[in-house]
Amino acid sequence: MTWYLVSFVLVFFLHDTYFYWTHRLMHTKKLFPYFHRVHHLSHKPSPMAALAFHPLEAMVEVFLFLLIPIFLPVHFSVIVLFTFFSLFMNVYGHLGFNLFSIERQKKFPLNLLSHSTNHSWHHQYHRGNYGFYLQFWDRMMKTWKGELKEIDHNSSVN
C-alpha cells in the first residue's frame, strides 16, 4: 500500500515536470503552429478547451504514460486513477472562473497550485504559466506571470 501511494505521488511529480518542459517547448516559434496552436484558439478557456488540442500534442502528452510503466513499477490502477485526476485538474485549469477566493488561493496548500486564473492568463498572452498542477517550475524558471485576480469575462483578449 505504501508503494501504491508513493508511486502515485511520483507519477504526479514526473508528469508535472514533463508537462512543464514539453508545454514550454511547444510554445517555441518553430513548434507552436504544429503542436499547440489549436489549443490556444481558446483565448478564454472553458472546460471544453481542456480537450481541444492537435493530435501531435496529444502524442507528446501520452508519451510519458507509455514510458512510466517501462521504467517505474506502478500498478495499472495508479495510471488509471492518475488519468482521471489529471483530467479533473485539466478541466479545473480551463474553467474560466475561480473555485476559490483569491485570498484562499494565496494560502498553503492552494498557493502551490496553478489555478484557472493563472492558466487564463497563459491563454490570453501565450507565454508564461506553463505548469499544469504546480507553480514550482514556473517559479523556478522565472516564467511565472500574472498576479491572481478575478477573471473579467467581458474584457477583450489579445
Image (cartoon, rainbow, N blue to C red):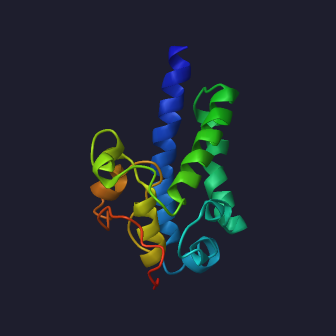
Vertical placement of residue 83 versus 40, above or below: above
Left or right placement of residue 124 versus residue 54 in this view: left
Q: Nearer the viewer, residue 127 or 123?
A: 123
Count of numbered badges drawn on the protein: 0
Residue 19 in the image, given as x and y percentages of width and height: 51, 54
Specify the farthest residue to the right.
Answer: 55
Specify the farthest residue to the top.
Answer: 1
Residue at horizontal 64 percent and vertical 51 percent from the top: 63
Left or right placement of residue 80 versus residue 135 in this view: right
Vertical placement of residue 66 versus 93, above or below: above
Left or right placement of residue 57 versus residue 148 in this view: right
Residue at horizontal 52 percent and vertical 45 percent from the top: 15
Q: Quadrant of the C terminus?
A: bottom left
Q: Quadrant of residue 4?
A: top right
Residue 42 in the image, given as x and y percentages of width and height: 59, 74
Left or right placement of residue 142 versus residue 38 in this view: left
Q: Nearer the viewer, residue 36 or 39?
A: 39
Q: In which quarter of the image is the N terminus?
A: top right
Residue at horizontal 62 percent and vertical 55 percent from the top: 61
Residue at horizontal 52 percent and vertical 19 percent from the top: 3
Residue 131 in the image, given as x and y percentages of width and height: 43, 56
